[in-house]
Image (cartoon, rainbow, N blue to C red):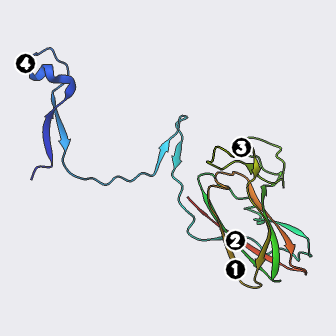
Amino acid sequence: MAYNREGYAPWSLTRKAGVQSATVNGDIEVPQYVQPVLDTGFVDEKGDWKGIKSSDESFFISDTSGVIANNGEVLFPNTADKDFIDMTGFKTITIALRPTNGGNYELDGVMGPATHSYANLKPINAGADLRGNTSMNESESGLYTLFSDTSEAMTADVWNIFTINSNRLADQKLLNFKITNKSGGNSTLDFAYLRVV
């Protein structure tokens, strides 16, 4: 069975009509079958290869915090090799917290540490609330805090898992989470995150 058929190239109908001065062969092969294509990235305007992002397969787990007093704060992630989250190409993030003391905690998305640049901008306002506008509603204008939960109840000694959708923190290049202990007593925290395209 033939997979291709012959057709006339639209630019060379004159050749098919018998005009010998045409410079292009009028016969082209037209594929007649389905062929899978795998898209793994693209070459940008500078000629650099850019791979397509894929969702994280598992959580990245930070180091356990020290003891956090009531009303004390801690920034996550906090490991030596990962002290901020790069959300470039990701739309959704799931965070997980495991406190040793149950109760309320405040969760804020803030600008990452001053030791890094935001793309090529430095210094940045480290620890400041992330501000922007993600609404598609034209009646909403101006900038607002992108993520702040002033009182989230958490259970002790288990992972409390929260998903932040709606492109709220999408493409933030230098993201930290500031966690404030409002549980009424001392607590240590484990923190983890997983990004979704």
* Pair 2/1: label in front: 1
Label disc, if present, on residue 141 of the rendered structure: 3
- Identify the amino acid type marked 1: Trp
The picture quadrant where one finds residue 113 is bottom right
Residue 5 left/right relative to 93: left
- Identify the amino acid type marked 2: Ala
For the residues labelled 2 and 4, the Cα–Cα distance comes to 72 Å
Residue 84 left/right relative to 16: right
For the residues labelled 1 and 4, the Cα–Cα distance comes to 77 Å
Residue 25 x, y percent position in the rendering: 16, 26
User: Upstream in the sequence, badge 2 or badge 4?
Assistant: 4
Q: Residues within 10 Å of mark 2 (few under 14, many from 20)?
A: some
Q: Secondary structure at mark 4?
A: loop
- Identify the amino acid type marked 3: Ser
Label disc, if present, on residue 192 of the rendered structure: 2
Furthest toward the front, the residue is 139
To which residue does mark 4 refer?
18
Residue 60 x, y percent position in the rendering: 66, 69
User: Upstream in the sequence, badge 1 or badge 3?
Assistant: 3
